[in-house]
Amino acid sequence: MRPCYPLLAIFFIASAATEAQVVPAVTPGPTMLPVISGTLHFDLRYSQTAQFYQNETTQSAIASGDAAYASPSLTRPTSFVYSGGDMWNFSGNNGESGVFQHLTVSQGFLMRDWTFMLTDDVSYMPQSPTTGFSGIPGVGSLPSSSTSSQSILTLNSRSVYNTVTASYTQRLNHATSLSLNGNYEIMRFPDGNGLESNQWQVGPQITRRLNARNSIFGQYSYSRSSFPGYTVTMNTQSAQFGGQRNWSRRLSTSASAGPEWVQGSDSAQIPSSSGLEVNANATYQAKSTTASLIYSQATQASAGALASFGTRNYDTTAGLTRQLGRDLSVNATAAYMRTRGLDVVNATNSKYTGVTNSEYGGVSATRRLGRYFDLFASYTASKQLSSSVLSAKAINGVSQTVTFGIGYSPREMHFRK
């Protein structure tokens, strides 16, 4: 459980700080009280699931919670989102078990002519993440469009991700801005059943606003990937040109495309190649409906459960959230991922390329019961077929999960200085 220590330390430090404020011999003054303001929301949930995989049914229980905090500052916004819990099986062997956690912390500095954003995203999962912010089907936590780089679906395979992202944007004039973006990501498998990787990426972007609805941009990106325990490294460069359009107050789209070049330190494992990198998304936001569609194709360092130092990914994800009246909400998520290992030379001196097709989708509904409680139910299905050599923990076929649960969701807490 070593990967849990950093998150547990956060709670221990917070508890110690709280106890340290209770000093009977001193009367607290205004300067001794914690200076905090903002909005905090949290949920507590308990659910039971039935998972159907490889002709076996596994029943599990999940105790979980999530919390979200946002500061009110317009110039120095701070936020965090956390989801975590514990899963345990009481029948069957194929179901997930153990602790899961996901935390995202963000700090921004928004000035008149420049902005700076710093974000840290860390997760500890017993499987490849799919639906919801937690990534665990049936938990019912905060929705999120974020995805990890583990494009191969796995079960009972612990993984740790940590991504630090920094972005600086300088306004050059009323219509043009220059950005410098960078990130560093690590992927680890504590049980040794996946290919681990380190990757850092940096690149500038220039954006030109044409009018109130349209803007264009160009960007360059350079990344370097390494693999703990191996001497192989991979360098990737890409140049993209794209545009963004706000079709209305509700609908916006963005798309970019450009060439990509890949070069490895060992041509037998990572051959030099070129291709097309594409990123596109559409977002619709109305009073009671939120929908998104995202497509991307690019080369990445590792797919985790695939024994390849580089993969070519083609990913499509879609999400829909709909509020039906005051008490009922529904959510749907779907994704298709096509992962192709880079060409490598085998013992017969011929090239081969393995392909993995992964799909997952889920629907959930939440019904409020009174002021603080709710009932929820969900169904999630995953399917994966591959011509590559995958980890023994990778899904081979179809996995289905049905969940029912109850949640406690109090009103938001508002703090003021």
Image: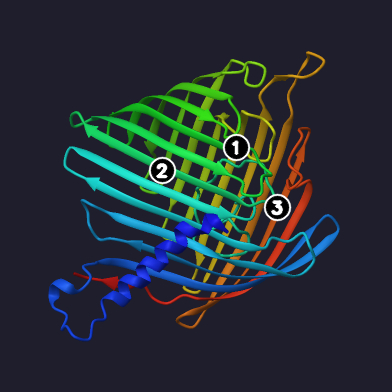
Is residue 384 visible in this depiction of the protein? yes
Residue under pointer 2: 164
Nearest to viewer (mark 1 / mark 2): 2
Residue under pointer 3: 155
Give the residue drawn at x 37%, y 72%: 15
Q: Which element carries disc 1, helix, strand or loop?
A: strand
**Whole-percent x and y of residue 145?**
50, 49
- Above or below, comparing residue 281 to residue 119 in the picture: above
- Above or below, comparing residue 288 to residue 76 in the picture: below
Q: Which disc is residue 256 wearing?
A: none
**Whole-percent x and y of residue 330?**
56, 63
Residue under pointer 1: 315
Closer to the chain start, of discs 2 and 3, is: 3
Give the residue drawn at x 43%, y 31%: 201
Within-10-Å neighbours for mark 2: few <14, some 14–19, many 20+: some
- The amino acid sitting under disc 3 is Leu
Closer to the chain start, of discs 3 and 1, is: 3
Q: How far apart are marks 2 and 3 (CA)?
A: 26 Å
Quadrant in the rendering for residue 244: top left
Quadrant in the rendering for residue 47: bottom right
Within-10-Å neighbours for mark 3: few <14, some 14–19, many 20+: some
